[in-house]
Image: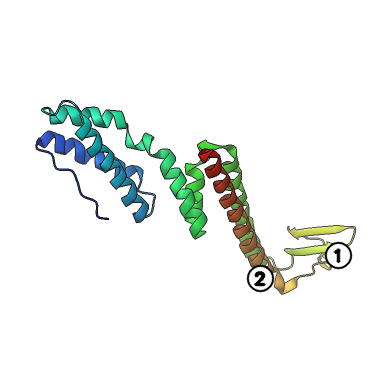
Amino acid sequence: MEFKKIQFKNADSQKIYENYLKQIQSAIKKLNQEDQNDILMEMNSHIYESMSKNEDENDELKNLINTLDKIGIPNDVLKPLVAEKKLNQATKTFNPIHIFEALILNFSYGIIYFIFFILYLFLFSFVVLIFAKLFYPNNVGFFYKKGEIFQYGGFIENEKLQNYEILGNWFIPVTILLAILFYFLITLLLKLKKSMRKKKNVV
């Protein structure tokens, strides 16, 4: 469905309306185009309906100002909706950029989102380990000796301990697989959390 702007008779009304639309667009710019269009049309419809219900039909400018005051500042009014839609986008696409944006937007809705943010940052340690293995192949790996040593990653300088590195050249591909596995696992948990929050809001 195509978005159509409301046309006002009063030039000042049109200017205020256009400025309000820009505020809406600024508030929803982090969303995908489809979600942006949906919100823009919904807000525009709300303005149109509120204007049509206003008793003072002879003062268009006054009606519009009253209507926009009732709706509120777009950045404040739309913040919860933008946070929810961004979270939906993130859990559907598994895109790391969308995920970080969604978590930041949802910080104010519970410490659990901050915990998820830390978990995703933890995944960065896998990248560090991969590069560390490339530059310090003898000091980074999976060191294991039953009952004595269990260390994944860390720098081992003791030559005797280096004998217990069991992955060798497989350390990098295994680390990549672990990073991918944890990434999808954490994202699925985030998706579950989103579903629980949605059910809670419905109840």
**Three-letter amino acid code of the residue under disc 2:** Pro
Residue nearer the viewer, 15 or 142: 15
User: What residue would you read off at disc 1?
Assistant: 160
Element carrying mark 2 = helix
Q: From mark 2 to mark 1, how far is it between C-alphas? A: 25 Å
Q: Position of residue 177 (x, y in %)?
A: 65, 67
Residue nearer the viewer, 48 or 104: 48
Q: Position of residue 43 (x, y in %)?
A: 30, 41
- Name the residue at 55% across, 39% down: 200
- Name the residue at 36% across, 37% down: 75
**Three-letter amino acid code of the residue under disc 1:** Lys
Element carrying mark 1 = helix
Task: Please give left or right for residue 110 compared with residue 143 in the image.
Answer: left
Q: Check residue 173 in the rendering and tell me which mark sits there, or answer none.
A: 2
Residue nearer the viewer, 143 or 200: 200
Q: Which of the 4 quarters of the picture holds residue 45?
A: top left
- Name the residue at 64% across, 64% down: 130
Q: Check residue 45 in the rendering and tell me which mark sits there, or answer none.
A: none
Q: Position of residue 49 (x, y in %)?
A: 24, 37
Task: Please give left or right for residue 130 compared with residue 108 in the image.
Answer: right
Q: Which of the 4 quarters of the picture holds residue 159?
A: bottom right
46 to 102, vertically: above or below: above
Task: Please give left or right for residue 169 compared with residue 121 in the image.
Answer: right
- Viewport quadrant of the C terminus: top right
166 to 148, vertically: above or below: below
